[in-house]
Amino acid sequence: MSVPASTGGMPSLVGLIGHPVAGNPTGPMLEATFAHHGLDWRYVSMDVLPERLAPAVAGLAALGFRGFHVTVPHKVAVVGHMDRLTEAAALIGAVNCVIAEGDGWLGENTDGKGFLESLEAIVDPKGLRVCLLGAGGAARAVAVELALAGARSIEIVNRDATRARVLADLIADRTTASSSVRSWSAPIEIGAAVDLVVNATSLGLNDPDAGPELDFSRAAGPLVADVVVHPPLTRLLREAGAAGLRTLDGQGMLVNQGARGFRLWTGIEPDRAVMRAALAMR
Ligand code: NDP
């Protein structure tokens, strides 16, 4: 599929496809950042039903979009509409950021890299023993990037055991990290041999009282991270903080993955303070 590079003096267009997309914070965050950098770019959030994905992607090419973000439920299905994939996107099996190249769409996955970047500000991922909650799109991205960054082992705890096993096999077969599966229970006990706990389920999203139930009584000081963006201080992070553990919220991941998309599309490194301020205003 041919993607036009020139916009002939018109604003450059990027955006988001998903269902639903109402309330997604990336549009306001990136619009504020385009304005800050004096770029004549627009970010359009578009609600696309699953059965309309193919014509929507073709339509974005016809309209000269420079790229687009992809969110639930299209991250896996959109792979079939890409002309090329980055190594990480191919491994993860999902795309959340698409870039128009001269002769087609390049599919990338910036979710895991965004997480890794915020993690690396606190701890070196090399050698970490990870307990990962979830096996959906975000969990796959986080697991693959952690493994590629040198994590020693990844234990996957997920409600759907088959999904957990598929992800564990991917990690064991395609990376140097070891992997294992634990069935979902309440509470999930975190043992002394865990350095990093990551909630990559949607438990806690838009509900400050919801979250996975963890037992830290045998833990030996792991860092506890949550990918949930809203609210930033999830129940899990409140409980981990009360237990004296270090925590990492999902907002850094969101800003980092948004910054990566911005840079891939425009070639400019965005001011992340502007992005964070735009998020805080929501
Ligand atoms: P998916 O639908 O692909 O996966 C959802 C995951 O949550 C699955 O592992 C699912 O388990 C689990 N889950 C859902 N409900 C429950 C429940 N009641 N009990 C136990 N497990 C449950 O979603 P994504 O992976 O795309 O998104 C997950 C989270 O990550 C969301 O909160 C999303 O907002 C966040 N996210 C944050 C980003 C950021 O930049 N901070 C970027 C991308 C996502 P099962 O397989 O058993 O159904």
Image (tube, rainbow, N blue to C red):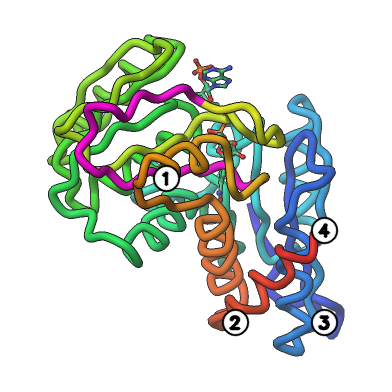
Residue behind label 3 places its C-beta within 8 angstroms of ligand 1: no
Query: Closer to the camera, 140 or 202?
Result: 202
> Does 142 sit left or right of 194 as displayed?
right
Q: Which mark is residue 44?
A: 4
Q: Position of residue 72 (x, y in %)?
A: 65, 34
Q: Amino acid at mark 4?
A: Val
Q: CA distance from mark 3 to mark 2?
A: 27 Å
How far apart are the alpha carbons under marks 1 and 3? 44 Å
Q: Main secondary structure of the magenta part?
A: loop
Tag 4 and tag 1, C-beta contact below 8 Å? no
- As helix, strand or loop, the secondary structure at mark 1 comes to strand
Per the rendered image, the range of residues in magenta is: 212-229
On the image, numbered disc 3 is attached to which residue?
8
Viewer-side residue, 205 vs 5? 205
Give the residue number, with chain letter if any, for mark 2.
271
Q: Give the CA separation, mark 4 to mark 3.
A: 19 Å
